[in-house]
Image: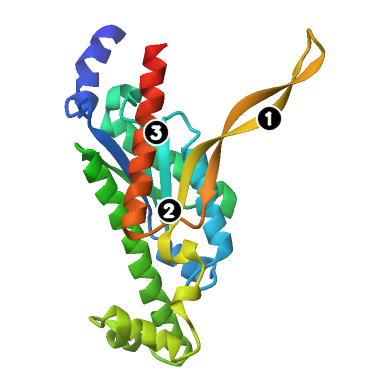
Amino acid sequence: MKFDELDKKLRVYETSHDFCVPPNIYMVARIDGRSFTKLTKEKHNFKRPFDENFRDLMVETVKHLMNCGFKVIYGFTESDEISLLFDLNEDTFSRKTRKYNSVLAGEASAKFTLGLGDIAAFDCRISQLPRKQDVVNYFRWRNEDAHRNALNSHCYWLLREKGKSATEATEEIEGKSTSFKNELLFSNGNNFNELPNWQKRGIGFYWINFEKKGWNPIKKVEVPTMRRCIKVDMDIPMGNEYDKFILEILEQSEKRDNSHYAT
């Protein structure tokens, strides 16, 4: 059988279940570390409950993902997870979810592995969100999850440091109210409200413009030029202010797209 015949006959097994996200649907990729508990607690023993070196590895991974060939307008990370919001008109790979999942998981795994100096793996899944409000709700969900995880983690490791076993520490805070957990920390000299915001809210990433000096070789003079860079925001808002923040990013992206098409 000739190659072209083989190619036509067998390629269908790879593509028969391809799904392409329809136009005018927002896409958000969520990328999660695989077996990171073992990697970060047993193999590398990062500081608990939060480690600045681990945080910086995640930051560099998000920045890499926002520069690896997709039009990402917002990134977010907490713990070992990353969320990426794509421009509404993103059409790389004809919006095939199989390609987004495989490429983003591979890129994240490679970047984090290089930074850590040890093998790390991520998985990826795509959320398809039909409305702006769904996008706002998604990131509000992850923002509040960061807050919940931070409170639980600080309580858990406080109890472990006081001699509790893993089971005892888990049982002591399981099902308890937020006020109970805050009081547990406060009574042991830890004010949760004074912890760094990146621990309690996660970290946001978005594009900003800045002016850079260039050189006009003809006139031999310096000229200002506009460039874009990623802003790493470790003080993102919470609650309704965060909703407004995400909505503004969506609206700014739409304005840029409309301006582009107008020209």
Q: Secondary structure at mark 1?
A: strand
Left or right for 242, reference 68: left
Residue 156 percent across, percent down from the top left: 39, 81
Kindly report the distance in space between the C-alpha atoms of the residues bearing marks 3 and 2: 21 Å
Instruction: Examine the rendering and report whether any part of residue 1 can be seen.
Output: no
Residue at x-position 32% and y-position 51%: 243
Alpha carbons under labels 1 and 2: distance apart: 29 Å
Residue that extends furthest to the right in the rendered view of this protein? 220
Residue on which disc 1 sits: 212
The residue singled out by tag 3 in the image is 252
> Residue 195: image x %, image y %?
50, 72
Near-viewer residue (218 or 155): 218
Q: Is residue 155 above or below residue 6?
A: below
Mark 3 or mark 2, which is nearer to you? 3
For disc 2, the neighbor class at 10 Å (few under 14, some 14 to 19, many from 20) is many
- The x, y position of residue 82, in whole percent, is 40, 50
Q: Residue at x 32, y 62 (%)?
A: 144
**How crowded is the residue under tag 1: few (<14 C-alpha within 10 Å), some, or many (20+)?**
few
Decide which of tag 3 and tag 2 comes sooner along the chain.
2
Which mark's residue is nearer the viewer, 1 or 2?
1
Q: Closest to the observer: 20 or 217? A: 217
